[in-house]
Image (cartoon, rainbow, N blue to C red):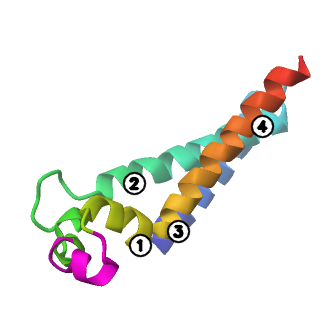
């Protein structure tokens, strides 16, 4: 991975120099924005390429956590409904984060609509 990052930095520098030389009217801000978008796109493509194939037994979705939730969820949480136990006990911080994001989004929409 460090070699890839070094290659990306060198490629971005070469692209910046080439763009400045061949397109003198092109603003540096535009060139930097395009270079940054290219680097972000590259990392997104690498991330997708490294993802495990759908349905494989070695996927993170098929690990021992889901079995533990199903087998010991009632005893550990005291809740009969497995889904409710997972959401309120095992994944409480995640659920709190999702609720916070929804609240902030609703507040932003209301503030935007009231500003006009």
Residue 33, quarter of picture:
top right
Quickly name the residue at label 3: 93
Left or right of 96 on screen, residue 77: left
Quickly name the residue at label 2: 46
Q: Marks 2/3: CA distance? A: 29 Å
Residue 20 numbered mark, or none: 4
The region drawn magenta spans 70-79
> Answer yes or no: do the residues labelled 2 and 3 have beta carbons within 8 Å?
no
Among all residues in the image, which is located at the extreme top?
116
Task: State the image coordinates of residue 51 (x, y, percent, origin top left).
Answer: 29, 57
Q: Earlier in the sequence, mark 4 or mark 2?
A: 4
Left or right of 54 on screen, residue 85: right
Mark 4 Cα-neighbour bin, 10 Å: few <14, some 14–19, many ≥20:
some
Q: Element type at marker 4?
A: helix
Mark 1 Cα-neighbour bin, 10 Å: few <14, some 14–19, many ≥20:
some
Q: Earlier in the sequence, mark 1 or mark 4?
A: 4
């Amino acid at each position: 991975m460090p070699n890839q990052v070094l290659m990306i930095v060198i490629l971005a520098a070469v692209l910046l120099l080439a763009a400045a030389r061949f397109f003198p009217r092109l603003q540096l801000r535009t060139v930097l924005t395009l270079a940054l978008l290219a680097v972000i796109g590259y990392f997104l493509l690498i991330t997708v390429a490294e993802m495990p194939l759908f349905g494989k037994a070695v996927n993170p979705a098929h690990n021992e956590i889901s079995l533990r939730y199903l087998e010991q969820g009632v005893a550990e949480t005291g809740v009969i409904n497995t889904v409710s136990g997972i959401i309120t006990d095992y994944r409480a911080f995640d659920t709190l984060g999702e609720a916070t994001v929804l609240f902030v989004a609703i507040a932003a929409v209301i503030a935007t609509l009231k500003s006009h």
